[in-house]
Image (tube, helix red, strand yellow):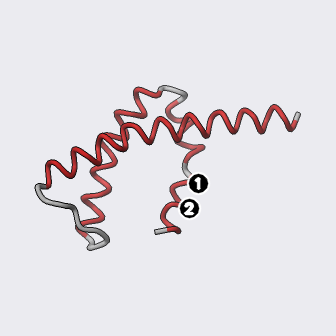
Amino acid sequence: IVALWMCFGTTSGTLARLLGGRLLLAAIAGSLLGPVSYVAGAAIGALTLAEPLPVSLLAVAALWALILPLLISVWTRSKGCNSTSAE
């Protein structure tokens, strides 16, 4: 799981550039793609989703709708701070 999160971390720059600071779009993407990835993980046996399934997926969607914009915002700010301090 640590390796999975490390791989996810390497995509944060790409996500930030693709979404261009549009945090609402990031929230929508997180709410749609988060549950899809959890369903895929459950399908290969990597995790078990609690029953009832719609409630579990709704909770995952809500969580990722908050987390993805937050991660992109933090990455964008930290990247801006690093590039400013390096100049």
**Which residue is the extreme one toward the right?**
87
Which residue appears at 88% of the width and 33% of the height? 87
Query: Is residue 29 positioned above or below 37 on the image?
Result: above
| Residue in view at x 48 percent, y 65 percent | 4
- Which label is found at residue 34? none
Residue at the disc numbered 2? 6
Q: Is residue 38 above or below residue 58?
A: below
From what the image shows, is residue 35 above or below residue 62? below
Q: How far across and down, in percent of the image, does residue 15 sit?
A: 52, 41
Q: Position of residue 80 (x, y in %)?
A: 72, 33
Residue 22 in picture, x, y percent from top left: 48, 26
> Is 6 situated left or right of 44 in this image?
right
- According to the picture, the residue beneath numbered tag 1 turns out to be 10
Label 1–label 2 contact, CB within 8 A: yes
Three-letter code for the amino acid on which mark 1 is drawn: Thr
Q: Is residue 1 left or right of residue 11?
A: left
| Pick the front one: 29 or 58 | 58
Label 1: which secondary element: helix
Picture coordinates of residue 79, whole percent (x, y): 70, 38
Q: Residues within 10 Å of mark 2 (few under 14, many from 20)?
A: few
Kind of residue at disc 2: Met
Disc 1 crowd rating (10 Å Cα; few below 14, some 14-19, many 20+) is few
Q: Is residue 26 left or right of residue 77?
A: left
| Distance between mark 1 and mark 2 Cα atoms | 7 Å
